[in-house]
Image (cartoon, grey):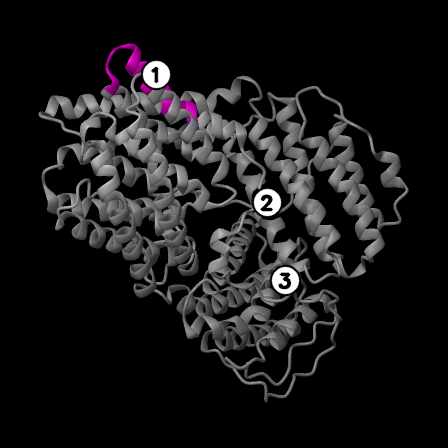
Amino acid sequence: MSDDKKSPTYNHTEIHHKIEASPKAQGIKAAFRFNHASSPWVRGISSGLSSSLPILIGILFDHLQYGLIASIGGFTYLYTKDEPYAQRGVKLFLVLLGITLCFTLGSLFADVAWMKTILFGVIGAVSVYVFGALKIPGPSAMFFVLSFAVSTSIPAPNLQAVFLHAGLVFLGGALSWCISMSGWLINPRGPETAAVAKAYRQLASFVGSLGTESFHAEQHKTVVELRAAETAMKQAKINRKKSSFAHRLFLLNQKAEGLFIFVMAAANDFNPAVSKKAQAVIETFASEMATLKKHKKIRDVREEIEELSIKEELRTLLLDVNDVLQMKELKETEYIQFSHGTIRARLKAAFHKRSYVLKNALRYGIIMIIAAAVAYTTNIPRSYWIPLTCAGVMLGATVRATVQRGIQRSVGTILGISIGTGILMLEPTGIVIALIVFVLQSTIEILIVKNYALGTLFITPNALLIAESGHPDKAISYFTSARVIDIVIGSVIGVVGTVLIFKRASSLRLPYLLGAVIRKEGQFLEMLSTEQDEERIKRERNKLQGELVNLRALYDNVIGEYSKTAVKLEGLWPAVVATQQLGYMLLASFEGYKLSETEKRELKETFAQLAAAAEQKRAPKLSSVPTLKHYPIIQGEIVALYESLQVEI
């Protein structure tokens, strides 16, 4: 793009929010940086129990080997997130079936090297695609690959033994399912309550960012959290007619969406003092919601709200939230529904030639096949650790993150060998093995949120203890002589393959997605001026909102790539921000725009030129931006988008 074009004429409504600096890719030092995340003690202990209890049960029945096999199913727990229990139960059961299937396939084809090689790629690619298309957080393909890899080294002399081992894995996973779902007995609405509280906490940060450089970043985070809260409410399958508490949660979530819409529409009218006061009230709501339970009445802040010097509409919204928390009945209002769409639609939507999810899955599968081929053409003992290491390294979100993971995995594992060697030299038996697995697995989950390398320090000894305890006579020699070689080879293949294959996947896609979103915004604006079908408007809102979130996620992937194209495309950051701002302003519009035929025609041409400019990385060929005298804010946002595209790429 060039900046020698004459700026178009317009009646400009000043947009007061500064654009923050573009996010920067993290360097190698980030691999050893500690995160300031709180330690997940409950998750750590639960994870430890999921892996160690099957071993303990096996020991009690004098079948240690059976217990070790069943502990593989315990990795099902690691896919537990903060989703509602109704959704969690279904998701973990499907994960349990997947892990069991992968283990079964590994046992069936343990002696067929070429089939194992292909299956490593298929299992990895399918897992990454499903997790990516459905945007499921968690370890993705890692433990499906692990269960397949480990099963290839566990002797199963006949078909009966194969299915016996598969049944043990299923039982171990079923136990971890019960552990994960046990919180339902104490607080059945805990996850969705936490999701709504988190949305309010982020909403408070958004309100506090008005007029600052962090406004657009907080805006994006708020939409993400509102989507998460809306999804949690739907996944919980709550019946508002039968549950007053569920109805209360629904209204709180609805009012959060109303607050976001109002703040978006009136953002320029806030001053810092008002923003901070409103932020404090919303933070109070979030804190109280975190402990919200059935029939519990929380602190009334009506007087604090009435003392604020704010617009009456905002005061009404805040008072409504307060009344809901005080268990008062309120009339429902229709706001934006931040939904993700059906599972089938999301899987289908991610399957096209420009899909980053599809390319990422293909890359993962191809590199896994290469790693497995290298493993099975060498004479390294337990060579499945090569593709297994590769699988963990490639789960980095970007190319840079993959490089960091390769470093973290190598360093953490090599240091962890000393721990594993020491444990195996002690030749632990019986209950001691179960206890060590519990401690190691709990430690991994508690520390890995702080730093991946620190977590991997305990991953290798834990996994090797499970895999090798059945034959301690070979364990130390295998552990000390082969693991370093496996880890280094697997890490190198993962990093090099990621850098070489589809290394510019995000960079190549960004201009096209930016253009597509701009074009969709123009179509949405035109639809708002003509469409009367509320259901269609709602569907299009959901599509546009999803694309806006995807646009920012794709830009984050771009800055994580090692390429000259990625560096140049950082110049599109102002356009990404301006596109998101315009899109969210349109999403906040509920009354149809009254546009003349001339305005519609001019706007159609304007958006077509802006979209083409983004796709072709050039300045828009426009002489003017249409004057929207009745909608100066929307006009100002369109002008801001035009100006953001006046950069040289």
Q: Which residue is mark 2?
A: 36
Q: Amino acid at mark 2?
A: His
Q: Identify which residue, 175 or 533, lies in the foreground.
A: 175
Taking the image as shown, residue 322 lies to the left or right of residue 639, namely right
Residue to which mark 3 is pinned = 581
Helix, strand or loop under label 2: loop
Say whether disc 1 or disc 2 marks the residue closer to the N-terminus. 2
The part of the chain drawn in magenta is 48-64
The answer to whether mark 1 and mark 2 are in CB contact below 8 A is: no
The residue positioned 65% from the left and 83% from the top of the image is 8
Q: Amino acid at mark 1?
A: Ile
- The residue that appears at 52% across and 22% down in the rendered structure is 183
Q: Position of residue 431 (x, y in %)?
A: 34, 16
Residue 413 coordinates in the image, percent (x, y):
35, 44
Please, what secondary structure does the residue beneath circle 3 have?
helix
Q: Quadrant of residue 268?
A: bottom right
At label 3, the amino acid type is Gln
Compared to residue 537, the image places residue 455 above or below, namely above
Answer whether residue 617 is magenta in the image: no
If you read the primary sequence from the N terminus, does the residue marked by circle 3 or circle 2 appear first? Answer: 2
Task: Give the Cα distance between marks 3 and 2.
Answer: 30 Å
Q: Residues within 10 Å of mark 2 (few under 14, many from 20)?
A: few
Measured along the vertical axis of the image, is residue 363 above or below residue 94? below
Q: In the image, 355: left or right of 170?
A: right
Tell us which disc is closer to us: 1 or 2: 1
Question: Which residue does the numbered mark 1 point to in the structure image?
Answer: 431
**Residue 234 in view, yes or no:** yes
Picture coordinates of residue 511, whole percent (x, y): 46, 70
| Dot in front, 1 or 3 | 1
